[in-house]
Image (cartoon, grey):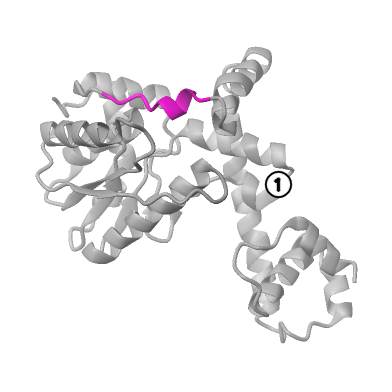
Amino acid sequence: MSTQSTAALWQIRKAVKPWLEDTSQPILFGCSGGADSLAMALALFAEANGQKVIPVVVDHGLQPESEQVTQQTIKVLMGIGYKEIETAKAQVTITDGLEASARRARYKIFNQFIDAYNAKYFLLAHTLNDQAETVLLGLARGSGTRSLSGMSVKNNVFVRPLLQISRAVTEAACIEGGVNIWQDPHNNDQRFTRVRVRKNVLPVIEENLGPKITEALARSADLLRDDADALDGFANEFINQVNPLDLDVKDLERLPRAIRTRVLRLAIYIAGAPSGTLAAEHISAVEGL
């Protein structure tokens, strides 16, 4: 296996390099054995230059061959040159759908390794295509600017350096690097909404609106994130100047609605609402009181 740079791998090396500049703490990254994470594994190994970089392979146990896939992924990572590889078996309790439950179990493991290593960053291999799919899913739900802004490059310790890199590039990088990738059967299972968006919706949009729609959707996410960050900032500035448990109705009425709804959301959470429990209809109901 080779990490010698050719066109696709070079793009990914450029994307990961800024996150490898501090050698004082380890860098972790998730690796499923798919094209995106193995392309990132190739790039990280090539760019490490003394930085301690450790792959984390999670076995979700959702398929009969999952343990075999984990072992194959470890073998590929060792072939790239990794000496230290962490693995864990997730306990997936399905409560709100298979995808969400698996994600929650996976991130629980990621956070455990972050704490154990005192890692500076944990890199995730989400791509431009993942971002476009996320935006379309948000539009289908009638989401606001925050959800439509998709995934951020950095969210605390979690970093997504490949959000400007297409899936075609990660697949090409794996071919260039001579690594065998795992094709997750769930990625073709049309029971999952994201798969239907990927296989059915995006191709139709591209056919009718042009091949650059994926890049356009991701660009919209970036622009909306700027707007959402600004509006959140104004709301936080307001809430820090008042008593959030005793808001003045007249002060709220003077605010633009985009800021007022954010202030109400913040106040409700400060009052004790469990995190993640508020939907737009809840905020609208409070606003109408």
The quadrant in which residue 258 appears is bottom right
Q: Is residue 8 left or right of residue 266?
A: left
Specify whether residue 176 is painted magenta: no
Q: Residue at x 9, y 44 (%)?
A: 83
Which residue has dot 1 on it?
143
Q: Residue at x 15, y 33 (%)?
A: 75
Q: Residue at x 61, y 38 (%)?
A: 135
Question: Image height check: is 282 above or below 217?
Answer: below
Disc 1 is placed on an element classified as: loop
Q: Residue at x 71, y 82 (%)?
A: 244
Position in image of residue 248 (x %, y %): 84, 83
Q: Is residue 116 left or right of residue 280?
A: left
Q: Is residue 113 left or right of residue 270?
A: left
**Towards the viewer: 244 or 284:** 284
Position in image of residue 18 (x %, y %): 30, 48
Amino acid type at circle 1 is Ser
Quadrant holding the C terminus: bottom right
Position in image of residue 267 (x %, y %): 70, 76
Question: Image height check: is 226 above or below 161?
Answer: below
What residue span does the magenta drawing correspond to?
181-189
